[in-house]
């Protein structure tokens, strides 16, 4: 059985903050302003995973009112989401993501971002190189992203539920 999930996130950009996307820092003079490290791509990926598995959203699992998550690396959120989804018997088939960002050209970083996501998911699933796809768009100087004030991400995932339910391979 296949399940689809969608995730979206955005964060305001501020000077003196690291720009973290997919678990790696991208050279930039501004970065996400957030309770955690503000990695919009991993936050949207977590939401897509939770959504596909019918497990709510990242805010339910990691409320930003909880001081434990202040400054937390989003790697932690992704690992927890992968563990929950994998534990419910799902295999991640593929990830398709779009990052919305005006001021930094992401083309030179897309491969590294995809590899970082594959590496973070590896304790749970071995993803083929072409199973994590990163796209980048500007917003043509419209809206907050277009004015360079924010960064956003949309992620779609496909999960397959293993027939035997557990972590083993399908028969
Ligand atoms: Mg977020």
Image (cartoon, helix red, strand yellow):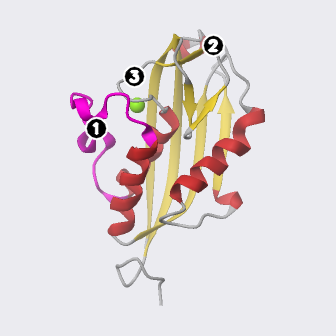
Q: Which of marks 1 and 3 is in front?
A: 3
Q: Give the range drawn in magenta.
A: 53-74
| Residue 117 % position (x, y) | 57, 50
| Quarter of the rendered image showing ligand 1 | top left
User: Distance from label 2 to label 1 (Cα)?
Assistant: 28 Å
Determine whether the residue tagged by mark 2 lies in a helix, strand or loop.
Answer: loop
User: Mark 3, residues whose alpha carbon is within 10 Å: few (<14), some, or many (≥20)?
Assistant: some
To which quarter of the image does residue 102 belong? Answer: top right
Q: In which quarter of the image is the N terminus?
A: bottom left
The question of residue 111 being in magenta is answered with no
Q: Is residue 95 visible?
A: no
Determine whether the residue tagged by mark 3 lies in a helix, strand or loop.
Answer: loop
Say which residue appears at 40% left-offset and 46% top-offset: 76
User: Mark 1, residues whose alpha carbon is within 10 Å: few (<14), some, or many (≥20)?
Assistant: few
Determine whether the residue tagged by mark 1 lies in a helix, strand or loop.
Answer: helix
User: Mark 2, residues whose alpha carbon is within 10 Å: few (<14), some, or many (≥20)?
Assistant: some
Q: Is mark 3 within 8 Å of ligand 1?
A: yes
Q: Relative to the observer, which residue lies in front, 2 or 150?
A: 150
User: Distance from label 1 to label 3 (Cα)?
Assistant: 13 Å
- In this rendering, the answer to whether 164 lies above or below 86 is below
Say which residue appears at 48% left-offset and 41% top-offset: 42
Return the disc, 3 or 2, that comes first in the chain's sequence: 2
| Residue 9 % position (x, y) | 44, 32
Contact (Cβ within 8 Å) of mark 1 with mark 3: no
Identify the residue under disc 2. 29
- In this rendering, the answer to whether 16 lies above or below 71 is above
To which quarter of the image does residue 147 belong? Answer: top right
Say which residue appears at 27% left-offset and 40% top-offset: 62
Residue 59 disc label: 1
């Amino acid at each position: 059985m296949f399940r689809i999930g969608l995730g979206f996130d955005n964060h305001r950009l501020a000077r003196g903050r690291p720009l973290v996307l997919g678990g790696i820092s991208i050279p930039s003079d501004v970065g996400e302003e957030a309770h955690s490290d503000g990695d919009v791509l991993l936050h949207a990926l977590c939401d897509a995973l939770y959504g596909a598995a019918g497990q709510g959203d990242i805010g339910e699992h990691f409320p930003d009112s909880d001081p434990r998550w202040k400054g937390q690396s989003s790697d932690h959120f992704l690992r927890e989401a992968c563990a929950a989804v994998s534990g419910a018997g799902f295999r991640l088939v593929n990830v398709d993501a779009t990052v919305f960002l005006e001021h930094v050209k992401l083309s030179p970083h897309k491969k590294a971002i995809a590899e970082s996501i594959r590496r973070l998911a590896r304790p749970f699933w071995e993803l083929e190189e072409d199973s994590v796809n990163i796209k980048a768009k500007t917003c043509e100087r419209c809206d907050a992203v277009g004015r360079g004030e924010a960064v956003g991400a949309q992620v779609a995932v496909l999960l397959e539920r293993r027939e035997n339910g557990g972590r083993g391979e399908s028969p």
